[in-house]
Amino acid sequence: MRVGTFVLAAQFPGQGQGEALHRAVRTAEVAEEAGLDSVWLAEHHFVPYGVCPSAVTLAAVLLGRTRRLRVGTAVSVLPAVHPVALGEQAALLHIVSGGRFTLGVGRGGPWVDLEVFGAGLDAYERGFPEALDLLLRWLTEPRVGAEGERFSFREVPVVPRAGELIGGEASPEVVVACTSQRSVRLAAERGLPMLLGMHCGDEDKAEMVAAWARWAREAGRDPDEVARIGAGHVSAGVVQLADRSQEAAETLVKAMPGWLKQGLDAHVTVDGRHRAMRDPVAYTELLCSLHPVGTPALAADRLAATAERTGITRFALLAEGSGDLAGTEENLRRLGAEVLPRLA
């Protein structure tokens, strides 16, 4: 079982953006000290829900600050960037980090980002498969050209090539954030593992894993390959540890709703469509019921149960739910010292 932490760089009420980013960097440093496997970085634009606008840029910083930790994006929003530019960055980080970088990609949402960056709503609604395919070609082929609906250019050499990493994987690991059956099928057909969100319970995640495996087999992959790729699925969640389970839940219910409300309310759709946002208190309580929130023993039991029910053995757990730097660091250290040994 591989347990990592999920970093949103959340700006809690009363905090500055620099404070949130400092906590994000410290989270990665402490995660490595605590023996965690990985850190996963979220990306958002123009909202205090998360103040990191470039997960791949922050990943570069954290790869330089750490020596063992795997650093992944969760996710780089593909419709907002050119796949070749993102592929160049991913290949660069893959090589210079010695293969410690994971590129997580997703569709994002119908937000005003699409207007600001000039991508347009169509890039979100229809363009993700084309962009993903171009990205994957860039990470695996020596020369790439394109003749698609959105991207069209003459063949050019790939520099640097991800395969130039000496003694390591030929290309960086790529995972796809999946929130719908359409994205599950896309990931399965491309032979890519999934990143499943923290809003899903074990039953929903198990159904998505089963659907992914079915579509992967239909795409012509044999059982061994399906099992090998499927071992890379990642389950996102929340972790909060305390000596009493009620105390852990109270910490999150006290801090998270204020952040969720101001962060989610700040999202603006590109075309004015109405997007119903979750009730912050009810959502926090749901997360407490789904994820390792409680004593270290309870947390270990919940992680083990999720792995058994879903088959997923990689976790990206949000540890900054208290909104407090010292509390986040203690939470991570307890995760490493008191939960991980129970999972061994």
Image (cartoon, helix red, strand yellow):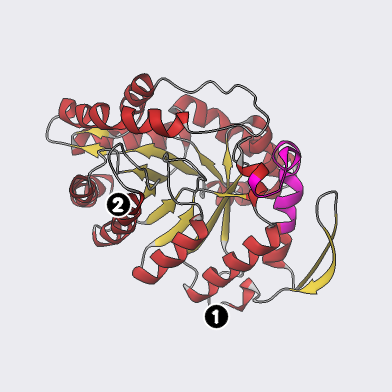
In the image, residue 314 lies at what x, y percent? 42, 47
- Looking at the image, residue 49 sits to the left or right of residue 16; the answer is right
Q: Which residues are magenta?
A: 116-134
- Using the image as rendered, state which of residue 89 and residue 168 is in the foreground: 89
Q: Main secondary structure of the magenta part?
A: helix
On whether residue 285 falls in the magenta region, the answer is no
The 10 Å Cα crowd at callout 2, few under 14, some 14 to 19, many 20 or more, is: some
- Looking at the image, residue 245 sits to the left or right of residue 238; the answer is left
Q: Earlier in the sequence, mark 1 or mark 2?
A: 2
Residue type beneath disc 2: Glu
On whether residue 132 falls in the magenta region, the answer is yes
Q: Quick check: can you spot residue 171? A: no
Circle count = 2
Q: Which residue is mark 2?
A: 19
Look at the picture and state if 132 lies above or below 181.
below
Query: Which label belongs to residue 66?
Result: none
Tag 2, which secondary structure?
helix
Tag 1, which secondary structure?
loop
Query: Which label belongs to residue 166?
Result: 1
What is the quadrant of residue 36 in the picture? bottom left
- Nearer the observer: mark 1 or 2; the answer is 2
Look at the picture and state if 66 lies above or below 257.
below
Residue type beneath disc 1: Ile
Q: Residue at x 66, y 74 (%)?
A: 161
The 10 Å Cα crowd at callout 1, few under 14, some 14 to 19, many 20 or more, is: few
In the image, residue 48 lies at what x, y percent? 41, 41
Instruction: Residue at the far left: name it.
Output: 243
What is the quadrant of residue 38 in the picture? bottom left
- Using the image as rendered, state which of residue 135 and residue 109 is in the foreground: 109
In the image, residue 335 lies at what x, y percent? 24, 47
